[in-house]
Image: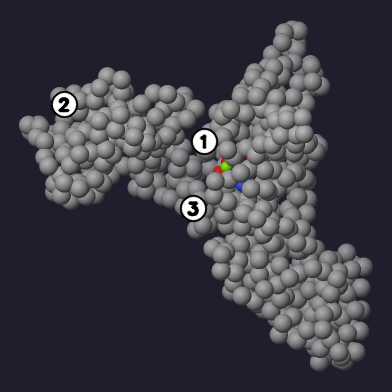
Amino acid sequence: MKQSMMFIPTLREVPADAEVKSHQLMLRAGYIRQNTSGVYSYLPLAHKVLKKIEAIVREEMHNAGASELLMPALQQAELWQESGRWYSYGPELMRLKDRHNRDFALGATHEEMITSLVRDEVKSYKRLPLALYQIQTKFRDEKRPRFGILRGREFIMKDAYSFHSSQESLDEGYDKMFAAYQNVFARCGLNFRAVIADSGAMGGTDTHEFMVLSEIGEDTIAYSDTSQYAANIEMAPVIETYEASTEVKQELVKVETPNQRTIDEVVNFLHVSKEQAIKSILFKVDEQFVLVLVRGDHEINDIKVKNLYGASVVELATPEETKNILNCVPGYVGPIGVNEGVEVIADHAVKAVVNGVCGANEENYHYNNVNVDRDYSVAKYADLRFIQEGDLSPDGEGRIQFAKGIEVGHVFKLGTRYSEAMDATYLDENGRSQPMIMGCYGIGVSRTLAAIIEQHNDDNGIVLPEAVAPFHVHIVPVNAKNDVQRELSEKLYSQMNNAGLEVLLDDRQERVGVKFADSDLIGIPVRITVGKKAEEGIVEVKVRKSGESFEVTTEELSSKLDQLLGN
Ligand code: ATP
Ligand code: MG
């Protein structure tokens, strides 16, 4: 490709509104442009990289036995009503009406669509298992679109779905997909980890997320410092046990704590440790109010609360609700004397707190020397807190450490969540009707592009691994007006093209400094500079990643490139 024909609008300045490296570089290198919040155009270079990522995904999906199809983005509301998600998905689902006033959604995901397709076509166990996938644009009206294409409102996803007649078959299909995902992300040159995840709104049980390790990741991974254990922090169970102190129980006292609302303020004011404090927070669990207690140095994990109740929505009670239910403002809430309509549940650690401190359900007052069972009762103890660094690893081996990750892929065992709701059944060997057992598997293709750039860059720009680079080689003549340089560049360009390499030739009438800066910015693995020594048949080869450069004769060039590009 001749560069004069390509559309690569590079920028010298770092765009002010781009916070993270990949977003800045994709704008500067002319990879993407924003249209509106969370909506981007992929310019030719990004488009080429996306096609490479997609090719890797297609190969691995093929190896995992999945076949490709393409379903509509425009989905009738009836499908989502059947599964129930029309009512539960919330504002992230983009909804619209057609001219007949019928409701539609733009596909945020395709469980409903594929389940309806397969239920109409597959009737017998003989046709199972079946795995299908597509690479398609998805729409989600994200609350906080950010970091460029890392969290867009329109983005490209590979989504695969599998249908099975037994749990064993699902397990097998899941393992194949899991392996395919490891191959995809390894081939993309990513440093990643597969972690145990929460199945969230999707329903289902077994699930893993593929996390690219990165400081800017929005997810926290809890991993063991000695074993292979790794989980999304949301999911990691806490297996710590707590010894109750042998301290003598003191008499309960109400103390004035003017304007001391947070745990830190209260423990400083009363000169007690955070471990002595009991944090009490009122939640709304579906339609029920629940007061959740954890120790002052711990954080409540609302997903654990949600899972404990099998609830669909868990939210903090609003200040108004807190006022109505406990007759108290947030900051002074506590478990003593709450009315019977409110269930009090506590993390295991709370049971061991002797002579603790908690809110008095009265503004500017706390209780001291609080003891459970004597002063208040707990309906249920459970694991309700987030795991912390230094906690025992849930597999019993080693201690927990944290890392940040960007979720690029997600594999789920859905089970019969959709097939039951949507009546997707097959006839088994005995002629009995059974719901299909399903799995689903997503890769954020456009997010993967950004994640690759987030991990592969330096001060001068993007440094793409060869497997996903938009071109293999960049030919840059130093002086575009020099006939010898221009002719040699053209000759090398056609030789390499014929040899099957993807080559970009910078044929622009630009200063060499500009050409070099652009070349570094856009991240092609190998640059060939055709300069003064063109007359002697000598060119300079520069490896983008290491910065190493050396001269070679045009005869040696092709074997040198074979070495460098590993083919
Ligand atoms: P997140 O927690 O980041 O919102 P999710 O759990 O909603 O992700 P899934 O529903 O599992 O994501 O979607 C499958 C994949 O699609 C994700 O692993 C991610 O790589 C990608 N993805 C999800 N939302 C976005 C988005 N807004 N922009 C770009 N990619 C996304
Ligand atoms: Mg999401």
Q: Which residue is mark 1?
A: 198
Q: Earlier in the sequence, mark 1 or mark 2?
A: 1
Query: Disc 2 vs disc 3: Cβ atoms closer than 8 Å?
Result: no
Question: Which is more toward the observer, 525 or 98?
Answer: 98
Q: Quadrant of ligand 1?
A: top right
Q: Which mark is residue 404?
A: 3
What is the distance, in whole Å, between disc 2 and disc 3 at their CAs?
41 Å
Residue 360 lies, with reference to residue 437, above or below; the image says: below
Q: Amino acid at mark 1?
A: Asp
Residue 140 lies, with reference to residue 342, above or below; the image says: below
Q: Where residue 449 sits in the image (x, y, percent)?
A: 67, 56
- Element marked by disc 2: loop
Q: Is residue 121 visible?
A: yes
Q: Where residue 31 sits in the image (x, y, percent)?
A: 71, 64
What is the distance, in whole Å, between disc 1 and disc 2 at their CAs?
36 Å
Q: Residues within 10 Å of mark 3 (few under 14, many from 20)?
A: some
Q: Which mark is residue 375?
A: 2
User: Residue at (75%, 44%) from the top-left corner?
Assistant: 135
Mark nearer the viewer, 2 or 3: 2
Q: Where residue 454 sits in the image (x, y, percent)?
A: 59, 61
Q: Amino acid at mark 3?
A: Lys
Residue 155 lies, with reference to residue 17, above or below; the image says: above
